[in-house]
Amino acid sequence: MKKLIVSGLLGTLLFACETTEKKETITVNYPQTKKVDSVDTYFGTDIKDPYRWLEDDRSEETKAWVKAENKVTFGYLEKIPFRNALKNRLEKLWNYEKLGSPFKEGEYTYFYKNDGLQDQYVVYRKKDNTEPEVFLDPNTFSEDGTTSLAGLSFTKDGSLAAYLISEGGSDWRKAIVIDTKSMEIVEDTLTDIKFSGLEWQGNEGFYYSSYDKPEGSELSAKTDQHKVYFHTLGTVQKEDRLIFGDRPEEKHRYIGASISEDQRYLTLSAATSTSGNKLFIKDLQDSNGVLVPIVSDTDSDNYLIDNVGSKLYIVTDRNAPNKKIITVDAAKPSPENWEDFISETENVLSPSTGGGYFFTEYMVDAVSKVMQYDYDGKMVREIKLPGVGSASGFGGKKEDSDFYFSFTNYITPGSSYKYNVDSGEYELYWKPDIDFNSDEYESNQVFFSSKDGTKIPMIITHKKGLELNGKNPTILYAYGGFNISITPSFSIANTVWMEQGGIYAVPNLRGGGEYGKKWHQAGIKMKKQNVFDDFIAAAEYLIDKNYTSSDYLAIRGGSNGGLLVGATMTQRPDLMQVALPAVGVMDMLRYHTFTAGAGWAYDYGTSEDSKEMFDYLKGYSPVHNIEADTEYPATLVTTGDHDDRVVPAHSFKFAAELQVKQTGQNPTLIRIETNAGHGAGTPVSKTIEQYADIFGFTLYNMGLRELPNQSVLKAFKE
């Protein structure tokens, strides 16, 4: 029996489910969200924005709304009978030693390590055969564990290091410089660094990038003028030298500095959006040297991967959608002088260098294939990987004879291998000791047709022997944007989902980078609907093949993937039982007015571009396409109250609108992590709690009142 009661402005929702044992009810009293008379006019069309006030994330009124929504959400989640069992199982599986691949800096070998349930990874180091010692422990950075290590850079001789910290998940960073021998801080902390690495020039100082720090809320500031500075060690930050970004013609949203391994060249990448960049170079050996343009437009992506003397090796997708490596002399570096070094292939290239070789990782239907080349461009060998999945980390310093790479897939926990560059042989360096038996699971790639006939790959992972009866709880996860490729990787959380009989399916949608520039551009601006159509087709494939059904299907995605979920659930609310949008871009008419949002216009376009673009964005913007008298899936929106990348107002407005217009029996909740940002650096304890809530909410709203795998419950009773 299912029953719905709606009363007044509070929208009281009573959900009653008849089971064979007893009737269970969860009552949800949504907080009343006030509306304001806010109207924007686009090309003669008035658009109401009644929840505009929620954009002021620091106001006391918004804070009170957040508190009220969280009270309702956690009150609901606490009533899910198996929520604690899921949390306990996640903690048990998560509690194993995790070790990053080692890297050499000066006299020491460094590595990242987590003992199991530490909120943040610890950086260790060792010299020769000595016992490892703690170098940096981010768990000591703050009492609540929300300050994380966000970057680490060493001088060439390893005697100095500068590291970045993020507080509360913010994209704004602070930089701290230490003497690696004494471990003493050598100067005052630098502040207001954003979207930047730290690039040392000798031991003199380092380059970093930032924006002018906004007044008031960091979340409402535009970031349309990035600047590169050089910080001289021992001086105060206000004296840092502005290198690039002070002239109108240098106005770019993202500028990054890089120093070549031999310390000879400074290169600057300057971009106006998330795709395409200008590239400049300066010879640091020339006292009169100036920045010289290599690429003067933003029609392609380009970066310097290495140099031998004045011979530059550049990775580019200019006239090569799947990327290639070219060579050119630094004295005449413009594109008309380029020569192919490693030519474009039918697969997307992602190269690295180390030990005097180039390593070219190719994506073949979203899985890795790695080749090794010498500096004459001759292929030395194809590296036979441990299996079918994702390889990373091929690379190191030129003098290295050995380095480390990692390998993983959806059923193989990430392991590290030590690779000899001359022989091509490798050996297992570290394999995690985890309570998970890969032999009990299978991961298979399938291809399906999207609405327009385009073939889309998808990897489906589940327990062996799964019965295709249409009743398997399934999470369909995707991203589909910004040239980002989703490749197979192991997730501790997903193992808990799958051991309960769940299916985890990941399609590689257009808009991503799995098949190069053309694949990306097939899912941007006026072609963005292709991405949603691909996702819908993936869901329909799973249903048609009887893996699952609409009653047992959940869709999930974060950031641009949160937009994907929001657009899909508003276009096809009948297709899924549960929707899980995380830190999503939900207001497509105003996204470009917040923080770094304007930089996403290459993918999205903006509502100010043209009436045609405005109409297109309005046609799929999740906030603007929630309709009354519609039954939407059970929805758990997740965000962080201090997210300064995709501001929480997107999720706030979406949840408020959905709570008012949801007419079906399904709950609409928003889970707001306080003192948290876009996700990076989230403490492990908070991550575990969030997954327990997501999985619990999903299974409960698929009609489950106990976990299918009771051995998990039994294990914790014992």
Image: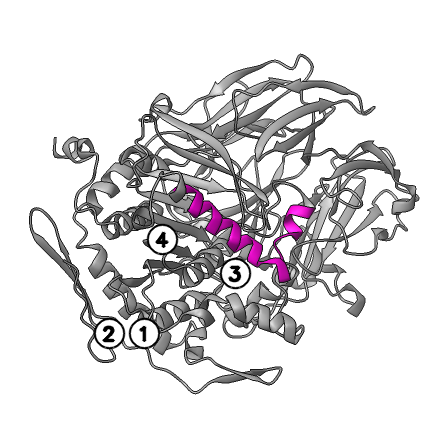
Q: Amino acid at mark 4?
A: Met
Q: Quadrant of the N terminus?
A: bottom left
Residue bearing the label numbered 3: 645
Q: Position of residue 91 (x, y in %)?
A: 28, 38
Residue bearing the label numbered 4: 576
Q: Earlier in the sequence, mark 2 or mark 1?
A: 2
Q: Looking at this view, name the residue that lies furthest to the left.
A: 21
In the image, residue 633 sits, relative to residue 395, either above or below, namely: below
Q: Residues within 10 Å of mark 4 (few under 14, many from 20)?
A: many
Q: CA distance from mark 2 to mark 1?
A: 7 Å
Which one is nearer the viewer's eye here, 335 or 470? 470
Q: Earlier in the sequence, mark 4 or mark 3?
A: 4
Q: Amino acid at mark 1?
A: Val
Q: Nearer the viewer, mark 3 or mark 1?
A: 1
Q: Earlier in the sequence, mark 3 or mark 2?
A: 2
Q: CA distance from mark 4 to mark 3?
A: 28 Å
Residue bearing the label numbered 2: 11
Residue bearing the label numbered 1: 660
Verify CB contact (< 8 Å) between mark 2 and mark 1: yes
Start and end of the magenta stretch?
518-542
Q: Nearer the viewer, mark 3 or mark 2?
A: 2
Q: Earlier in the sequence, mark 1 or mark 4?
A: 4
